[in-house]
Image (cartoon, helix red, strand yellow):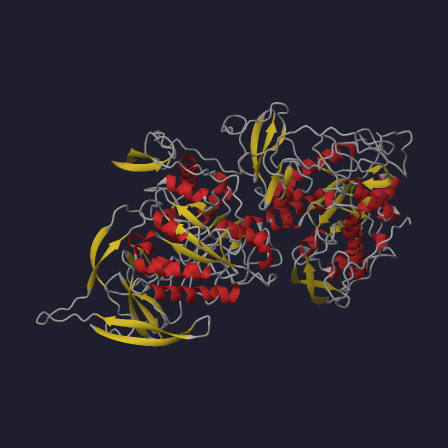
Amino acid sequence: VNQQQKESANKTDDGKSTVLVQQKQEILLCSTSKAVQWYGFFEMIMWQTAIFGLVTLVVLSKVDGQKKEDDFQCPSATGTGNFADPATCRRFYQCVDGYPYMNRCPSGLFFDDISKFCTFKNEARCGPIASTPAPITEPPTDLAEKCNNKECQLPYCFCSKDGTCQLSFLKQTPQMILLTFDGAVNLQNYDHYKKVLNGKRTNPNGCPIKGTFYVSHEYSNYQMIQQLASEGNEIGTETISLQTGLQDKGYEEWVGEMIGMREILRHFANISKSEVVGMRAPFLKPGRNTQYKVLEEFGYIYDSSVGVPALPIPVWPYTLDYKIPHECKSGTCPTKSFPGVWEVPLNAHFVEGFEGGHCPYLDQCVLHNHDPDDVFQWLQEDFSKYYDQNRAPYMMAFHTNWFSIKELEKGLGKFLDWASNLPDVWFVTTTQALTWMTDPKGLKQLDNYEPWSCNKKDNLPPTPCKTSIKCALSFKKENFTDTRYLETCRDCPNQYPWLGDATGSGIPNKDNYVPDNVIFTVDGQKKEDDFQCPSATGTGNFADPATCRRFYQCVDGYPYMNRCPSGLFFDDISKFCTFKNEARCGPIASTPAPITEPPTDLAEKCNNKECQLPYCFCSKDGTCQLSFLKQTPQMILLTFDGAVNLQNYDHYKKVLNGKRTNPNGCPIKGTFYVSHEYSNYQMIQQLASEGNEIGTETISLQTGLQDKGYEEWVGEMIGMREILRHFANISKSEVVGMRAPFLKPGRNTQYKVLEEFGYIYDSSVGVPALPIPVWPYTLDYKIPHECKSGTCPTKSFPGVWEVPLNAHFVEGFEGGHCPYLDQCVLHNHDPDDVFQWLQEDFSKYYDQNRAPYMMAFHTNWFSIKELEKGLGKFLDWASNLPDVWFLTTTQALTWMTDPKGLKQLDNYEPWSCNKKDNLPPAPCKTSIKCALSFKRDNFTDTRYLEACRDCPNQYPWLGDATGSGIPNKDNYVEDNV
């Protein structure tokens, strides 16, 4: 055996040089006339799904760099890369500048010449594989498109050109490390996993580090799995059988494997299926579009099966709204779009100039011939590509066999001890990482960041029994019967659980799984056994007790299950899907209201004799028609909430394209209730200059504003109006309407501000699902319907208009009830279905009392192409009706104060195309882009502002609407003082 040493200086973090000694060995096989020298050892092969060790004699070859192999020539076309050894599948050559360096796969693994890493024998495409031209086929027409950053925005979508972009809007991005473990959990590996997650290694907030387990069924111990879950580790699914070739199987096979595995976890490890939201395909072979269809339909949040080749900059997780941004190593990645489904890819591990190869699983890299310090240094070098560059999450994926080699386990321990002491490194579960990505926080905010806190979740399983029940069960598979052992904390089943019988009932093929987004039929396909419609009502929307992502639509006592659109959660008070931080989630028990003295200054019920137009309008229930006009026009109010920016501006311009016109030939218009953060004021000025109405939402969109005082409402509303005046050139006399964040009016306080600061109307009050919609009304009298938010005004505010949001719904058609159209469950319909749904909803207005049809949107409606196309069809259809008018909210109220018949409207001045004198001029063609300091709470960050005026000193905010840099300088005086 010839041995040589190669020394290379490597700089450590403290700047000192260390010498890495890499021993190079070569096996010389002598002729039969000479002695043969062998260097060998016995090695325990610990298979992922095996329960016993197998002793095997192997020859350890460390020929990884000194002598050029005479029998192998590196391909001249490339000269660099990993290539199979023609003689054996256990070795491969790492070619560097045309020279081959021989490496040996870890014990039990074989080289795959397609994926270019060591893997299990049954998955390895072994030996050199010649390139053959792909067959000529017609390209599919429904492929996902390339990333569009303008349309793809957090929290609902994340993509980039090549996947490597940093979340650049956060200067202090935490470095997340994702510890993941694949396969069965049992005595073979449990103590090793507990040694990693020992409770002593903690994150910067003092909480113990956590990991994610993608569990397969055979040989798993469910008492151990329940223990891991009860400690806050995440449990995802691999599959039941770990069968090979699953990537080419159909929908039913994937449902059986994935959803069956989830059901086994629920039944035997006491883990709620709402907590099992991630999966990993066996052998990192995703099931093309089929697997992702199952993920989407059965309520999974993410997949983590896609391998990424060795790239200098690692790839961030991304949603599958668009095409995957890198080469697909397996060749079986999804090609269609699956909006809102996350992919958490496995970046290849490698260190330039250091043997080990490229690998998605760390145990597939050739590190078994190194001591713990070498392994530690290799992991540090690999980690530095993330930590020192774009801080993509560092995925450390393991099989059991990593822990069968003491040097690897010790080296990992050194790395974990080192990394867990870094102040900006967090070991989190995969779901915790994605939760952060949907709402990123800076390092200074993370100590109190609830999703990463130590607080125990209510839906974690309880601590398992101390002594498990061990079951010896009959196992029937294909043409043989065997015995399998199951350990759990519940009574033994009749038979070993398997495909088609996840609970082990002994009844073959009894399982029938229904997608989360499929409603249950009344006539018998399947009624939810776990949910009973409340007997007192029998009809309405009710929370799913198991998950906030779903709700039940009860019709005559029968539950129809619906799923909220991606990113939204069901609120069991307001009865519609909303943002997570606003959802009062899960069934909420009714409690008697506290006994209080009734206030004495409440608004009275409508008095039609005293309440007369043009100054007052009311009715008993709000639904009365303006009966003195036989020919009432049907008004449609297009309204858009939130910031206006590149994410949505082109979508809004597509709606208001100038081609759709009212019966008088004037282009249709809309109303924008604008919030400040991330808004582009050049775009807002352009919309206003074209005759669209601009109203205010608030500056900060803070939650809980409904319970704040007068000064807070003045700062939010009047400050927002001042920002529009200063940066979008919109006169404050033109900003006369507002909408409260999350449709949570500020009780009487907000309306006092409206009244005192010259607003004409509010549009924040939601109306429940009524057969006849409600007209706008003045607040001289009591509101004529139920207050959905519970925070409506109770006093009288004479002359202030309320333009309510009637609930959208279609009887007998899934979709739910919603004030914002994007909160109705329509994302699983094609454009024609959406068009028909809108027509049916609209008919309640058009064919009855002709109350204004409010179409309220957030940006996320336009992130789903089917919804946008369906809306386009509806707008084209409605704008061709001779008695339908698309107006701003103020135009509708102007008509209500002085109603005109259809025949008079062609020459009706308030609805004409004549440009108003007080509209802002068209904005500059090129905006001024300002990077500004933003001080908020206890941190300083950078925010960007685009407008047609010089940059302010600081980012405008509460108390400093012009960005002067002088805190709390603003002092607003009421119009009536």
Q: In this rendering, is residue 924 above or below 776?
A: below
What is the residue that sits farthest to the left in this orientation? 33
Q: Position of residue 321 (x, y in %)?
A: 54, 52
Residue at 71% from the left image edge and 42% from the top image edge: 743
Q: Is residue 525 found left or right of 374 in the rendered image?
A: right
Image quadrant where residue 486 sits? top left
Q: Position of residue 317 (x, y in %)?
A: 51, 56
Q: Position of residue 720 (x, y in %)?
A: 77, 54
**Front residue of 532 and 467:** 467
Residue at 70% from the left image edge and 66% from the top image edge: 929
In which quadrant of the rendered image does the N terminus lie? bottom left
**Front residue of 68 and 771:** 68
**Front residue of 272 and 863:** 272
Image quadrant where residue 185 sits? top left
Q: In this rendering, is residue 616 above or below 888?
A: above
| Residue 195 in view | yes
Q: In this rendering, is residue 963 above or below 809?
A: below
Q: In this rendering, is residue 202 above or below 491?
A: below
| Residue 364 in view | no
Q: Is residue 405 found left or right of 709 in the rendered image?
A: left
**Front residue of 112 and 610:** 610
What is the residue that sits farthest to the top in this orientation? 535
Numbered-mark total: 0
Residue at 46% from the left image edge and 66% from the top image edge: 384
